[in-house]
Image (tube, rainbow, N blue to C red):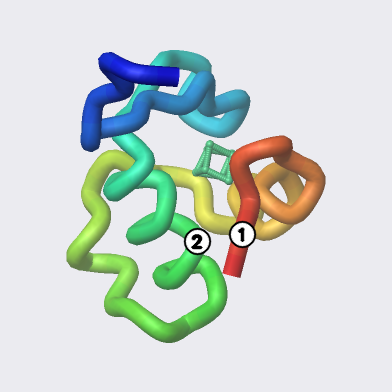
């Protein structure tokens, strides 16, 4: 278990690519209305995010 890096990357089915988990959390928070969606320009379809994120293995609160 040694050698793990701090920055984790997740395979994001919403954006269809690997993203840093910090961006994933921002997307989750913005999707929940806890962060301005304007702060996450990577996402263009928030309706899709509302459906995809809760079913994603990387989803957490
Ligand atoms: S929870 Fe949402 S933003 Fe995070 S990896 Fe899954 S689909 Fe992407």
Disc 2 or disc 1, which is closer to the eye?
A: 1
Toward which corner of the image does residue 42 lie, by quadrant? top left
Q: What residue is shown with label 2?
A: 28
Q: Of 56 and 51, which appears nearest the observer?
A: 56
**Rendered-image quarter of ligand 1:** top right
Query: Is residue 24 left or right of 46 when viewed as pictured?
Result: left
Q: Of 44 and 7, which appears nearest the observer?
A: 7
Q: Which residue is drawn at the image coordinates 80% and 45% (left, top)?
A: 55
Task: Determine whether label 2 and label 1 are within 8 Å by CB.
Answer: yes
Extreme residue toward the bottom, this view: 34
Instruction: Tell me if the residue at label 1 has its CB under 8 Å from ligand 1.
Output: yes
User: Percent x, y for residue 26?
Assistant: 34, 60
Indicate whether 37 appears above or below 48: below
User: Percent x, y for residue 37?
Assistant: 32, 68
Q: CA distance from mark 2 to mark 1?
A: 8 Å
Query: Is residue 46 left or right of 48 when viewed as pictured?
Result: left
Quarter the C terminus occupies: bottom right
Q: What residue is shown with label 1?
A: 60
Toward which corner of the image does residue 17 lie, by quadrant? top left
Instruction: Tell me if the residue at label 2 has its CB under 8 Å from ligand 1.
Output: yes
Q: Which residue is drawn at the image coordinates 22% and 66% (left, top)?
A: 38
């Amino acid at each position: 278990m040694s050698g793990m890096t701090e920055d984790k990357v997740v395979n994001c089915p919403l954006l269809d690519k690997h993203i840093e988990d910090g961006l994933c959390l921002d997307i989750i928070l913005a999707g929940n209305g806890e962060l301005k969606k304007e702060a996450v320009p990577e996402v263009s379809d928030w309706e899709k995010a509302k459906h995809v994120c809760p079913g994603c293995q990387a989803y957490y609160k």
